Image (cartoon, grey):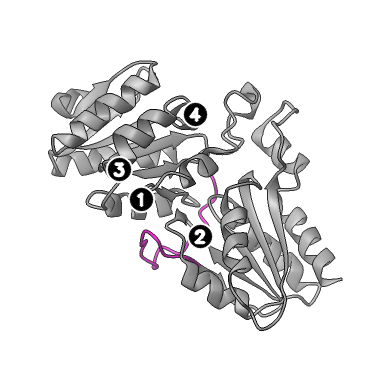
Amino acid sequence: MRKTCLDTVYGLARDDSRIVFVGSDLGVNTLSEFREELPNQFYMEGVSEAALIGMAAGLAMEGKIPYVNTIATFITRRCFDQLAIDVCLHRLKLRLIGNGGGLVYAPLGPTHEAIEDIAILRALPNMTIVAPADADEMRRLLPETVDYPGPIYIRLAKGHDPIVTDGSKPFQIGAAIPMSEGSDALIVTTGITLGLALTARDQLARHGIEPAILHVPTIKPLDIESILKYVEQVPIVVTVEEHSIIGGLGGAVAEVIAEGDFASPKRFRRLGIPDSFPDRYGSQQDLLEAYGITAEGIVSVVMSLVR
């Protein structure tokens, strides 16, 4: 997904001189063709994220459309004030590409695990947040970001994730995407958890349970209308995310349900990372399994609510 994202930004920049890339601590050969072909649209700032955002904000104020790329924890935690004051307050057209959303950098420990990036940025007015499920969805998303108003945070997964989205469905920022119909439960996903939910759907079907699946690649602005429509039709709702259960997709959907005034009560659970720093070391998959963010974990939660 990361390579697809950066290569697509390069392609967009070739056709639009307003687009500039601003990087921090990239690998030696990353985007070397971009650097050589479009030197006036390529900047390497170095490891100083607050300065990175300040510089990109200045470029945006001069009519450029900067795509800023660095590790997700750095682009959110280390420059929050610059994002709030320099970028969001002025509603600048800045695109923040956060590498390694969630537990991607699990081998490096809590300093690099972006478990609260969505929550941090959801609190900022004017910020848009997107988390594509796979490389194909990323490819459909990026052209929509060029002239979209205001700043956008693009959450990148690890890469080489299976393609699970439908290429015939266009990407619209702010729109949820129905992936499966069902009346027994609703599974709401974002990012790579869509693939887990689709696998869980097949396992639940063997138990006679037909869940609807609603993929939410845009966490902000949230497609409240679609969420209300699908929640109304089911007794059980489960959100799944590679993020803290506080302030992310689950929190956003919980807010919608709390104010939904439904005719019948809903049984609701958030499946994600608990309110703690990950205290285990291993691979991304190791930690996902430890927290139950798996197809089997989804099945277990849905079944417990059915019972």
* Disc 4 to disc 1, C-alpha distance: 27 Å
Assess disc 1: are there few (<14), some (14-19) or many (≥20) residues with their C-alpha within 10 Å of its C-alpha.
many
Q: Quadrant of residue 305?
A: bottom right
**Mark 3 or 4 closer to N-term?**
3
User: Considering depth in this image, is 197 or 146 the residue closer to the camera?
Assistant: 146
Q: Quadrant of residue 75?
A: top left
**Mark 2 or 4 closer to N-term?**
4
Horizontal side, residue 291 vs residue 67: left or right:
right
Residue visible at 64% across and 29% down in the picture: 106
| Quadrant showing the C terminus | bottom right
Q: Which residues are magenta?
A: 161-177
Say how many tags the image has: 4
Look at label 3 and name its amino acid. Answer: Thr
Look at label 4 and name its amino acid. Answer: Arg
Look at label 2 and name its amino acid. Answer: Val
The residue tagged 1 is 139
Determine the secondary structure under disc 4. helix
Determine contact: label 1, label 2, CB under 8 Å.
no
The residue tagged 2 is 216
**Mark 1 or 3 closer to N-term?**
3
Q: Is residue 160 visible?
A: no
Look at label 1 and name its amino acid. Answer: Arg
Mark number displayed over residue 8: 3
